[in-house]
Image (tube, grey):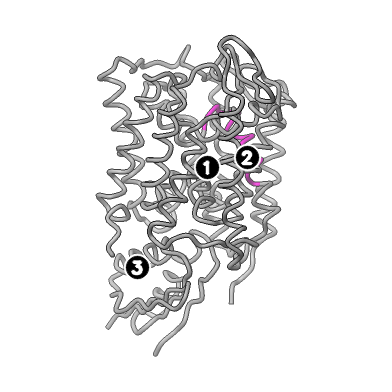
Amino acid sequence: MRNFLASRWGIICVGGLIGVFAALLQKWGNPGNMGICVACFERDIAGAVGLHRAHVVQYMRPEILGFVFGALIAAFSFRDFRPRAGSAPIVRFVLGMWAMIGALVFLGCPWRAMLRLAGGDGTAILGLLGLVFGIFIGTKFFRSGFTLGREAKSYRAVGLLLPGIMLFFLVLMLIFPQIQGEPKSGILFYSVKGPGAQHAPLLVSLAVGLLVGFVAQRSRFCTMGAFRDLILFRQTHLLGGVVALILAAFAVNLLVGQFHPGFVDQPVAHNQHIWNFLGMTLAGLAFALAGGCPGRQLFMAGEGDGDAALFVLGMIVGAAFSHNFGLASSPAGVGPYGIQAVFLGLTVCLAIGFFMRRKLA
Amino acid sequence: MSKTVDARGLSCPQPVLMSMETMKKMQRGEIVVLVDTQASRENVSRAAQSQGWEVKEIREDGDEFHLYITRE
């Protein structure tokens, strides 16, 4: 059967749909220019389970859980569930950690960078340029033979582990629901102020997550891949989805009065341009080497990719380090050790790129 | 003349990168590309068409896809 969502118009529809719902989620309660942010939301999940204690960013984001379930359902519906693992798992985990640390210096994943732009946040421009620069470095490594090696087919259970963890998180959320004004419910943490306290109703978030997960898995939507394919192959297929996302979010923002152009006092953002740029350079390089943006890693994890699952877990753990060590930025600017972290991360990721090159037979 | 590109188990962008390099090297003839995800199948097909090659046949073998791409 032809897969419409994987066609040119298909990916444009998917990007548009993500843009529309991301902007609407902001209207429905999610933080400013953060309708959907995979990095921020995984960071909030790390906070919800207490891996870090930054009390303003703790919430079990149902969108993330929905992404994995939606992708899983799509994969099972179209014989696309392929349990696989074993392509340098430790490297995937480490790349996930550094991707998150870089993204939290900028304050957002590529999706949010685009949503920030679509909301009028000019500081996102340097972040996006940094992202493209990081991906550009990544393509140089691919050109010179970089590979994490082959994945092997694996047990069905391997592919179901991350969806299982996400299901466990959802069950926890139902057993320990948010209590208004309380920072904790049972074992889960819930922000009472800050971005973590701003969220759409659980069922709305979960439903949007499921829908996006389903169509994104079918279309292979990937923000990193969009720029990588443009640089590496001069292909604009995935880029169509990215442009559609920005335009759709921009249109909805205009309609509902969420468009506020400027470079100062933008929601959950800072304007230290160099660190916005270099933070996203680090993240972009890590995404490129690992073969997918954070959203795509969730969708691949949903279709049984155990290595993508490890990248996701690396990001969650990276978020914990980020907040425990003061690496993450805040609207006031970069964290006390954010700059050192960017340089260490770039060193590690460049070393991974440099030392993992070989010619495939 | 036919050449086989084994991209099974490799993640993006390697299947496309390997196929493109082989297409460039061969200019014409037949290439058999082995992949094992639908995403790679779509990506390699798209890349082949963009380079003026034709996807003549896609054979499914268990969990694998064998793409026969040709150019006169």
Proximity of marks 1 and 2: CB atoms separated by less than 8 Å: yes
Seen from the viewer's position, the closer of residues A303 and A38 is: A303
Give the amino acid type for the residue marked by disc 3 in the picture: Ser
View extreme (front): residue: A175
Determine which residue is flagged by label 1. Answer: A294
Identify the residue under disc 2.
A315
Does residue A316 appear in this view? yes
Image quarter for residue A275? Answer: top right
Q: Is the magenta stretch mostly helix, strand or loop?
A: helix
**Callout 3: residue from which chain?**
B
Q: CA gap, disc 2 to disc 3? A: 32 Å
Residue B28 included in the magenta stretch of the image: no
Q: Give the range drawn in magenta.
A: A95-108
The percent coordinates of residue A194 (x first, y second) are: 56, 14
A357 relative position to B2: left or right: right
> Going by the image, does A344 lie left or right of A13?
right
Give me the disc on residue B45.
3
Q: Which chain carries label 2?
A: A
